[in-house]
Image: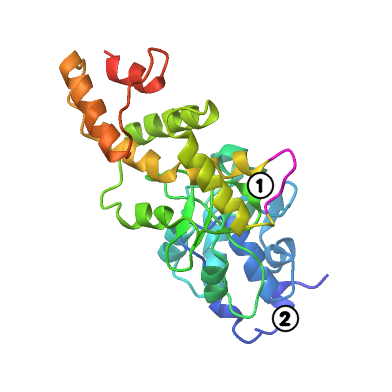
Amino acid sequence: MRTATMWPTPPGALRVRPLPREATASYLTRLAAAYHLSAAQLLDGLHITTTGTPAAPPATEIHLSNEAARRLSHFTRIPPAHLARALARRPPPAAIGTARTATARWQPAQPAVQPLPACTACTAHRSPHQTVPAWIHPAPSLPRALICTRHQQASSDPRQRTPLTISAVPELTRARLTTRRPPTASSLSWASTITTRWYDHHQHLHQRWHTRLHRLTTTNPHLPQGLASPALTCRNLITYPETLTLATALDRLPPHPLTPTQQTAFLHDLASRLQLPRLAPADHDLLHQRLTAR
C-alpha cells in the first residue's frame, strides 16, 4: 500500500492550508488528495495508529492525539498552535492514548454538530489544483449557517452537500456584514428556537421566508427535492437575518421580570426592526414565554 512517506512532494501540495474552523477529517481528506492518497493512507504514512471506521465528511470526524497532531504539523509545516487554531481542535479524549502515542480515532458526528460545506472559491484558494470539497464548523456565536460575503455562497445544512449561490437574497450578506457584535449564547439560543418555531408553524414572517426560499431554489436548481427538502435544509439560512435581529434585541432586554409596559415597548421596537406593522405573539408563542419568564 502506498503511503505518504513513499511519495515525493507534488507541486503545490504543501500549500494545502486548512480553512478557519475546518473539520479535521475534511482537512486530512484534502491534504491526502494532494498526494493521491486516502486519509487513512496518509495517517499510515505518518505512522499514526487509527481506530474506528474511516468515512468521508461530514458524517465522521477524526480525533488526533497530541503526538498525532504534532506529526501532522511537522508534515504540513504549519506550526502546531496555528494548525490547532485553524481546525478548532479540542483536547483529545482521555481514551485516545497517552501524550507520547500517535493515535487517531474516527467517530460518527451527530447531525446537529456536523460541519457544513465550505465556499468552493475559498476552498480552491487554500488547495490549488484540487476539487475536493471542504467542510467547516460555523461560528458558535452566530446562527448555524456559513455565509461567504465575498463569493456569495452559503450553506446551513450538511445534507446540502454543496454551498448555495445567494446573490438573489442580498439580505443574507447584509445581515452578516452588519453584525458588529455577536449576540450572547443565551440570546442566540432563544432566538434560533423562536424563529425555527415561527418558520415551522408559518407565523409572523411566513410570506417573507417563503419568498426567500423561492429565490434560493430558483437560483440553485441542484437542491435535492427528496426527504430533506429545501424548505428544511435551507431553514437556518432563510431565517438567518431575523434570528440575528431577534438575538440582538433579546440582548438588550432589562432583567426579568418585565412589566407589561416593558413588554409592549420591546414588541413595538422589535416589530420595527423586523419591518413588521405589528407583533403580538400569542400566549403559546415562545417569544411571549421568553418575555414573561421569571
Magenta highlight on residue 130: no
Q: Disc 2 or 1, which lies upstream in sequence?
A: 2
Q: Nearer the viewer, residue 270 or 211?
A: 211
How many residues crowd around disc 2 within 10 Å: few (fewer than 14), some, or many (20 or more)? few
Residue placed under numbered mark 1 in the picture: 159
Horizontal side of 7 relative to 256 (left or right) equals right
Question: 41 above or below 142?
Answer: below
Name the residue type under label 1: Arg
Q: Which residues are magenta?
A: 223-228
The residue that appears at 42% across and 59% down in the rendered structure is 85
Q: Residue 188: x and y, percent?
A: 36, 36
Magenta stretch, overall SS: loop
Question: 196 above or below 294?
Answer: below
User: Which image quadrant is residue 95 in?
Assistant: top right
Please, what secondary structure does the residue beneath circle 1 have?
helix
* Residue 184 visible to an observer of this rendering: no
Residue placed under numbered mark 2 in the picture: 7
Name the residue type under label 2: Trp
Horizontal side of 255 relative to 3 (left or right) equals left
Q: Residue 15: x and y, percent?
A: 54, 79
User: Which image quadrant is residue 194 in?
Assistant: top left
* Residue 218 visible to an observer of this rendering: yes
Label 2 or label 1, whichever lies nearer to me, is 1
Most extreme residue toward the bottom is: 11
User: Which image quadrant is residue 225 in?
Assistant: top right
Q: Residue 5: x and y, percent?
A: 70, 76
The residue that appears at 47% across and 48% down in the rendered structure is 90
Please, what secondary structure does the residue beneath circle 2 have?
loop
Question: What label sits on residue 48 in the rendered view?
Answer: none
Question: 165 above or below 105?
Answer: below
